[in-house]
Image: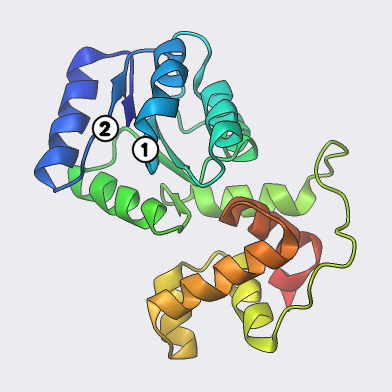
Amino acid sequence: MVVDDHPMWRDAVERDLQQAGFDVVAVAADGRQALARFPAARPQVVVLDLQIPEPNGVEVTRQVLTTDPSARVLILSASGEQADVLEAVKAGATGYLVKSASRAELLDAVRRVAAGDSVFTPGLAGLVLGEFRRMEDPAGPGPLSGPESLTERETEVLRMVAKGLGYKQIAERLVISHRTVQNHVQNTLRKLQMHNRVELTRYAIEQGLDAE
């Protein structure tokens, strides 16, 4: 699903995705249209501009993931400002690209986000991880009471997730398949009662796994 209030940009992104073999199930020009069309369309990935008529991209992200926690939101914005990036990620976005990204970068980001990976314009990943490390959010999830214990391999994968490595990089380091890494992450999400990799990364950093 492509959400952008600029018709030419929206049409271009839709065309690029379709030409690359993606099924664009819906488009929307503003937040209200996006939220109205999302339940019926049920896209796996939402490519979303932040600066759209209300509700804005951050609120759309929040509501979309409340409706369907398995959905993935990739922000495609003209803004690379720290505050915008962090607000989007806190709302649950799993990727953030600025609009200066190339067509190839966009297509790669959509594929990776669909596979459960986190994707950020170069330079933004470290900013996000650093902010999570410093952030104290009283409204955020508290300590988890008695989750199922993680296996040694799941803990090892979680530690690499906390350091910002992608699934492909983790697979190469552990000499296992990309799908096996995904399975470990999905099992860890289930055990920790979390919905996406952003929550998982934050949890891992809070546990100090990124420093090990």
Q: Is residue 64 left or right of residue 176?
A: right
- Callout 1: SS: loop
Which kind of residue does numbered mark 2 sit on? Val
Which kind of residue does numbered mark 1 sit on? Pro
Name the residue at 58% across, 22% down. Answer: 59
What's the CA distance linking mark 1 and mark 2? 7 Å
- Callout 2: SS: loop
Asked if 133 appears above or below 154 in the picture, the reply is above
Query: Splitting the image into 4 quarters, where does residue 45 fall?
Result: top left
Q: Are marks 1 and 2 in contact (CB under 8 Å)?
A: yes
Q: Is residue 75 left or right of residue 17?
A: right
Residue 64, horizontal then vertical, whole percent: 52, 30
Residue 78 visible in rendering: no
Between residues 75 and 70, which one lies in front from this camera angle? 70
Q: Is residue 138 left or right of residue 162?
A: right
Query: Splitting the image into 4 quarters, where does residue 65 fall?
Result: top right
| Residue tagged 1 | 43
Name the residue at 19% across, 31% down. Answer: 14
Residue 192, horizontal then vertical, whole percent: 73, 63
Name the residue at 48% across, 76% down. Answer: 181
Q: Residues within 10 Å of mark 2 (few under 14, many from 20)?
A: some
Please tell me the numbered disc located at residue 25.
Answer: 2
Residue 121, horizontal then vertical, whole percent: 41, 47
